[in-house]
Amino acid sequence: MRKIDLNNFQVATSETARDINSRIMLNLVRKHQPISRADLTRYSGLQRSTVSVITEQLISERWLREGDMGQSLRGRRPTFLHLNEDRAGFFGINVRPFTTNMALANLTGDFLAQESMPTPSSASQFVDQIGQRIRSLKLEFPQMAYEGIGVSLPGRVDLSSQKFIFAPNLNWREEDLKERLEQATGLPVDLENEANACALSEFWFGHHSDGARNLIAVAVSEGIGIGMVLNGQLVRGPSGLAGEFGHVALSEEGPKCGCGNTGCWEVYASNSAAVRYYNDAVAAGRNGKGRPHVKNGKLHLNGKNGSNGANTFEDVLEGAERGDLQALAALDRMAHYLGTGIAMLVTGLAPDAIVVVGEVTRAWDRIEPIINEVVKRRSFTHATTRIYASGPAPQPRLRGIIALVLQKHFGAPVIG
Amino acid sequence: MRKIDLNNFQVATSETARDINSRIMLNLVRKHQPISRADLTRYSGLQRSTVSVITEQLISERWLREGDMGQSLRGRRPTFLHLNEDRAGFFGINVRPFTTNMALANLTGDFLAQESMPTPSSASQFVDQIGQRIRSLKLEFPQMAYEGIGVSLPGRVDLSSQKFIFAPNLNWREEDLKERLEQATGLPVDLENEANACALSEFWFGHHSDGARNLIAVAVSEGIGIGMVLNGQLVRGPSGLAGEFGHVALSEEGPKCGCGNTGCWEVYASNSAAVRYYNDAVAAGRNGKGRPHVKNGKLHLNGKNGSNGANTFEDVLEGAERGDLQALAALDRMAHYLGTGIAMLVTGLAPDAIVVVGEVTRAWDRIEPIINEVVKRRSFTHATTRIYASGPAPQPRLRGIIALVLQKHFGAPVIG
DNA sequence: AAGATAAAGTTCGAGTCACGAACAAATCCC
DNA sequence: GGGATTTGTTCGTGACTCGAACTTTATCTT
């Protein structure tokens, strides 16, 4: 039950009922297509007449289209309805520190086109380049009705100003990206944190989560970001800062983190942490020791990510695939701490599922049992959260940011 | 934006709009009463005619009543509307390990009667005794229309079966309390975890949280329970287990907790923990030492809560009020760890506010600065969460469980 | 082959609802 | 007392869902 927000509510008009029921129809078609009007009445509980009128309207607005006839044991054969794949173009843009991906998707969430480019060094250049690509894609697919743009960012987006803040790995200035991109393209733009995008992707496209309304995405890269869908809604907190579990301390003591705190989860379990473990082990190996440096009971931090030894997380992963013992040990250690943090999420939020996203899932076979063991040992035993690597969808962030824009048409209208 | 739950949704009928708008009216009256119809049209954006019809209906159903005339600078004077205090009796029952409180509240949430009794030793006796008291209260207030019963429990309630599970401090068997109480009283019954009740109390009755839609309650007693309101909704997780942050480990090593894990937050920061600190200090004092027992780097656990020295948390609080240094040290230590856990919540969920509930708030002046210092140092600095002790409301659990039942009439109808 | 049966889908009148204009009531100012 | 102003009500209109009746298109039975 939701409390009505008296600072920001919507009264119901005579069109509200149609609004709600159209959304329900769209969702039923999305889930069950191809589906007949008769089945829609059965699933929805609405009257046949009402379903007829609503679908007629959705067809005339090109959200739905009629397809083939279905079979029936006796009586008139049903006409199948489908989502209209030609309608509604959504652009999704996934900005990562070095690479930016872009896709054009239709109503069903399928990608019609996909592009990749080096991430520009400033927001201005980004707006220019994206604007240009969108214009040329629009020319390439002239029959689409374009609906909006979603941008996934490696940082948090302030909810009220829609400016993005905190992109430690992106050297853009805090700018009004949303408005500038809207002006450049003439389309509505939504910015979102990448972990939130991953959570949305699982929520809207993950078939396993059929009835799951509480999902958490753990986006592991240079840091760790958490995206939460609870009660079927993205949890962003009052200003968009919710989800920084990556900066929760796993122990009172511990290595210093860039955020000012010490012992943050992401200092132990991010890609950078694995690189550090690996470099330390390699260095220690050269010194004739078998263990990483430890000074007064604390981990020894070798400056910034992988600066010592110049290894990258890619190197660690490749090493592990080759069977390099030091790389495997680094990964195992990372997995152990991933498990520790995930145990915290399982205990505190008891979601249906937790999805791990990031390069590290390439080594999922290796790390999964470690994570499971730690979670089993260190979490509240009654929760039955499933933990898995982000599915076969190649680009969770990109699909998630598409889900964000799709939501506007498939989500329940906010009333009351 | 909410995704429509296709396993469990509600279509809109012709009455849906009225449903929604009535709720909005009720909420506006609740917030602004006394208020005129004219002001309701201004706040709501509905037409004067619509407001007239809706209020007339709400008055005929006795939700609202007309009151005095208001003033106006010119023109006809407005008729004030109020919530009808005589309508709608809600029973709230707060079950704690030793004492059970009960209250009868009206639409405005004011208590008309309040009772207290020792907590029965079994659920059967509980149902019998409560049934009897409710029958006699109904006779005492015959004009009320009774709407429901809410029960706050020191444990978690399974969402699907509505059985309560996990009441480590309550020796009742896992039983179908809900149905039995409904049969005994003829009223709908809702069970809820006490921390969730506290969160609801703050959300519905805390005037400070005017626009706050993300609140967390930290209920500190023998253990630590967390109740979360995020996006204006209680977060219970798929089966009602969300909120067990009390069993998140603050460090890899640490004292064993009853849950099986080690180093749980509540082992460090609950009332029982403070008693343990105090008893250890007293024992150490007798041994001529000034510090608690420590064995191989771990805290020394003296059996169960306060068994050594037979002190209670009440003793610690009284000791602190008298200025007993050992009691003050125990409290300070508890406060430190309360801060550590709260920092986790601030970092991970960045709510508008965190409310601390429990006996420990009697020493709030002492512990607040300690908590604030730890939170400031150990949480993500960008969040602006306010932390305070549960307000002057004498019985947060009781008010919260009333809020739970009130929600049914003031919450937004679930559509789509 | 004709009629019965059944399922899909449409049409239409009735009831509910919010809207908005017109109207009635109450009060102040000059 | 008359105009201005604000509150609150009445009533016709259009949007919506409902449900019954009806049409269309099949299969099954005899």
Image (spheres, coloured by chain):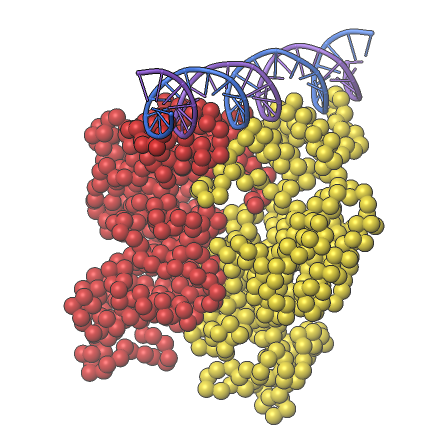
Chain colours: A red, B yellow, C purple, D blue
Give whichever of A103, A378 is nearer the camera.
Answer: A378
- Count of marks overlaid on the render: 0
Q: For residue C27, what is the image quadrant?
A: top right
Give whichever of B351, A15 is nearer the camera.
Answer: A15
- Which residue is farthest left? A322
> Residue B290's x, y, as percent?
59, 87
Viewed as shown, does residue D7 lie left or right of B241?
Answer: right
Relative to A33, is B322 above or below? below
> Residue B361's x, y, as percent?
65, 65
Relative to B92, is A182 above or below? above
Viewed as shown, does residue A161 lie left or right of B207?
Answer: left
Q: Residue at x 25, y 39 (%)?
A: A111
Q: Residue at x 63, y 33 (%)?
A: B22
Q: Is residue B62 visible?
A: yes
- Which residue is farthest bottom? B287
Give whichever of A300, B309 is nearer the camera.
Answer: B309
Q: Residue at x 64, y 65 (%)?
A: B358
Q: Residue at x 72, y 34 (%)?
A: B61
Quadrant for the N terminus of chain A in the image:
top right
Give whichever of C21, A81 is nearer the camera.
Answer: A81
Relative to A223, is A154 above or below? above
